[in-house]
Image (tube, rainbow, N blue to C red):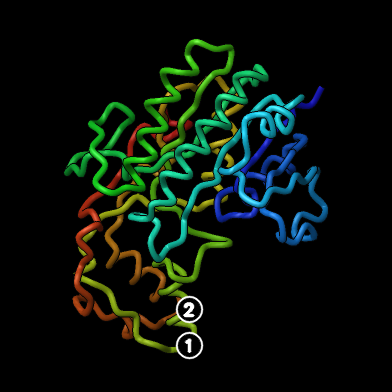
Amino acid sequence: MTNLFLVTGSSGFVGRQIVEALSAKGFEIRAVVRKGVDASTFSGLNITIVESNDIFEENEAWWRNTLRGVDYVIHSAWYVNPVDYLTSYKNIDSLLGTIKIAKAAADENIKKFIGIGTCFEYRESNEDLDNCSPLAPNTLYAAAKVSVYFLLSQFLKSTQTKFLWCRLFYLYGEGEKQQRLVPYIINNLAENKVVELSSGEQIKDYMDVKIAANDIIDASIGNSTGAINICSGVGISVHDLAMSIADRVKKSHLIRIGVNVKKASDPQRVVGKNAYKRI
């Protein structure tokens, strides 16, 4: 019998790629989406749609009913408005709502609950980060994520539901919000506009979201539990990333380094190790 996956945030940047990859692998999918999402965007996928006005406001009874018959939960939904997601109080709503979903999953004896974490949970370091590196979130977003990790690590170990926490590093690719770095560079270059950056010295671990989605699924159906890194394991400076994109279209002259001031919340170096499939 084919395993049934329930996916939250399935119309989002990461969730959409998870749904497409699950469908390509032949799994059954139950996708929870906000009311008003165009269901035709899932055309051709092996998927059943469940609508909600706000998944984080649904009670545990609603979730138990929605989870009935499900084998795996991949919970990718969270408040991610690029304008204020690092500081918004809606991170608290996402945290509390996630706990309700996990409690309902345990009640329904789901095989595995897979949560999506972030590399921002780690303490900033000059060393590569593995899943045993110290945690020290310095934003509300990261603090809420790491709180979910600690809470569910303790709660689910006393149930029949296994727990996997996938810490994502810097993803790019299809469906990415236009305010983010890579689309900003690509769009400005396409319009022959100057790309204004800070010093560009920050070293980041970038990964295509499609590869990340497949790694999340493989880890979900495999034996992995606890926290793992979903990363490339390779660091590249923002400057070199921008130049590599510009060089492909012969527009490196449009890259301007040192124009913007580096944001205080932007870490200087975030590179993962022990990437999934390399453990």
Which quarter of the figure is the C terminus placed in?
top left
| Residue at screen point 31% across, 32% down | 130
Kindly state the secondary structure of the residue where label 1 is placed. Answer: loop
Q: Is residue 100 above or below residue 233?
A: above
Which quarter of the figure is the N terminus placed in?
top right
- Toward the bottom, the furthest residue is 192
Q: Read off the residue under disc 2.
A: 187
Q: Position of residue 234 (x, y in %)?
A: 34, 47
Left or right: 227 in relation to 33: left
Q: Quadrant of residue 107?
A: top right
Q: Read off the residue under disc 1.
A: 191
| Residue at screen point 34% across, 44% down | 142
| Residue at screen point 35% across, 86% down | 194
Q: Position of residue 31 (x, y in %)?
A: 71, 43
- Amino acid at circle 1: Glu
Left or right: 204 in relation to 104: left
- Amino acid at circle 2: Asn
Q: Position of residue 205 (x, y in %)?
A: 35, 50
Left or right: 155 in relation to 216: left
Q: Position of residue 241 (x, y in %)?
A: 34, 64
Q: Are marks 2 and 1 in contact (CB under 8 Å)?
A: yes
Kindly state the secondary structure of the residue where label 2 is placed. Answer: helix
Q: Is residue 161 above or below residue 168?
A: above
Q: Quadrant of residue 25?
A: top right
Q: State the count of labels.
A: 2
Whole-angstrom CA distance, mark 2 to mark 1, is 6 Å
- Packing grade of label 2 (10 A; few <14, some 14-19, many >=20) is few
- Packing grade of label 1 (10 A; few <14, some 14-19, many >=20) is few
Marking on residue 201: none
| Residue at screen point 75% across, 44% down | 50
